[in-house]
Amino acid sequence: MTESSHDPEPRQPFKTLRFADSIEPAMNFTNCPIDAVRPTHPVLRPPSFTTVAGTRWLGRALRKISIRAIVPLGLLVLSVIVGDSSTCLAGTVDELSDRDPVVARLSAPMKAIVDGVSFRDAVNQIASRAGVNIWISRNVDPTAKVEIGPLGPTGFAAIEQLAASRNCVAHLIAGVVLVGPAGWVDDTTAGVLNRAPKPPAIADVTWPVLSTPQQALAAAGEAAPTNDALPYDLWPATTWTQIDRAVAIELVKRQFPTAPAKQPVARRYRSKDIEEVRKAIQQNDPKARVRVVDGALEVRAASAAHRVAAATMMRLSKPKPGADEPTFSLKVTTSARNALNQLCAAADRKCEIAPSAVEACDHEISIEEKDISLTELIKRVAAQVGVKATWTNKSVVFEKL
């Protein structure tokens, strides 16, 4: 349909929007990268939709395009109006929302016992179960054995507890959970939030075991070598799923000393408990600038205050109705007595070992189970040493079979 010749306003240029024809299916979660669907041309930016001129412009543009193009354009318009970046699976870098799928997964019920494994393996186990990316500071000993008992009641709480066992903290930024000393986490957060703005390039980023930092930087998407090569080191295999490449590059570089962040950084928060989030921020940073705009809390504050805000949101976020009951994972080599004591504590029961089962429960066991009920896990541990478990309201009694 041609535009009416009586329209008094000049036409605005219009560029056809094309989308990727297909997405490669991820047959292997860790080794099959998926490129984010995004326009092959710059996103069309019309005049403000709140003005009459802008409304007329949009109406004329819609009349000029085919029916097939209306749906994708409508999605883009909605994205501009509400500020939603849902197409980025890694989440919006500058905004944290309790509707973010990553927040939902980290806030879902989870309990685990990972004693006997290394710190890195323990953190990776929890992150894998929660389906989130993880980045551990190289200043933390990854080989230290974990011996802290039951973790939970959520995935993020479990990671926080593991971090605290090494005098570290945890923080979610841009779809990645950082684990390390508070100063490193806060400086890395500032680096990510203050990075040079550019359109997101979402991809899977992976490098093999024994990669150097420079090789990790290339895998993250650094187009050309930096002027100053990163120090030599050998890193473990790493996979980040659906991460903004600019964020990945920043994370790699932040493993090495940089100037500490002194200026406050900005971030938005969307939460049903927005007042609790505001209170947590202002308690941590009394000088923080906080205001509510379109239902979101816009905050300019020290990085540490943003870390506290995110932790508050995780604690207050409620899983959706009908969420599964918590399951447990256990990978440990220890005595059956120790394992049963910890599992019973997780069940809020006293562990009672009958005289007939004392010798059996002192035997060492090696067990690796994932995502099973607590009742079944206790049953399997007991079976390894030939004892049976009897549940009561206040205890679990173990007797020789």
Image (spheres, rainbow, N blue to C red):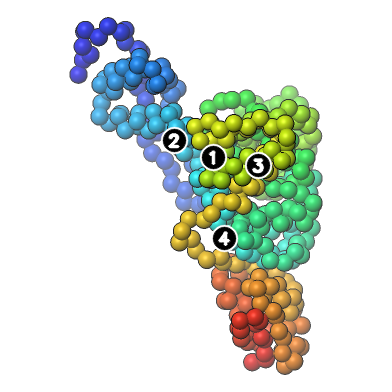
Q: Residue at x 74, y 59 (%)?
A: 118
**Which one is nearer the viewer's eye here, 358 or 281?**
281
Which residue is label 3 attached to? 279
Relative to 263, say whether 157 is above or below.
Answer: below
Q: Quadrant of residue 245?
A: top right
Q: Quadrant of the N terminus?
A: top left
User: Closer to the N terminus: mark 1 or mark 4?
Assistant: 4
**How far across and down, in percent of the image, does residue 63 sit?**
25, 21
Q: Residue at x 44, y 35 (%)?
A: 37
The mark that comes first in sequence, 1 or 3, is 1
Viewer-nearest of discs 1 and 4: 1
Name the amino acid type tagged 4: Pro
- Amino acid carrying mark 3 in the image: Lys
Q: Is residue 241 visible?
A: no
Which class describes the residues within 10 Å of circle 1: few (<14), some (14-19), or many (20+)?
Answer: many
The residue at 55%/57% (across/down) is 108
**Alpha carbon of mark 2 to alpha carbon of mark 3: how far?**
38 Å
Q: How far is disc 1 from disc 4 in space, using C-alphas?
A: 21 Å
Q: Which mark is residue 270?
A: 1
Residue denoted by label 2: 37
Q: Residues within 10 Å of mark 2 (few under 14, many from 20)?
A: some
The answer to whether residue 236 is left or right of residue 84 is: right
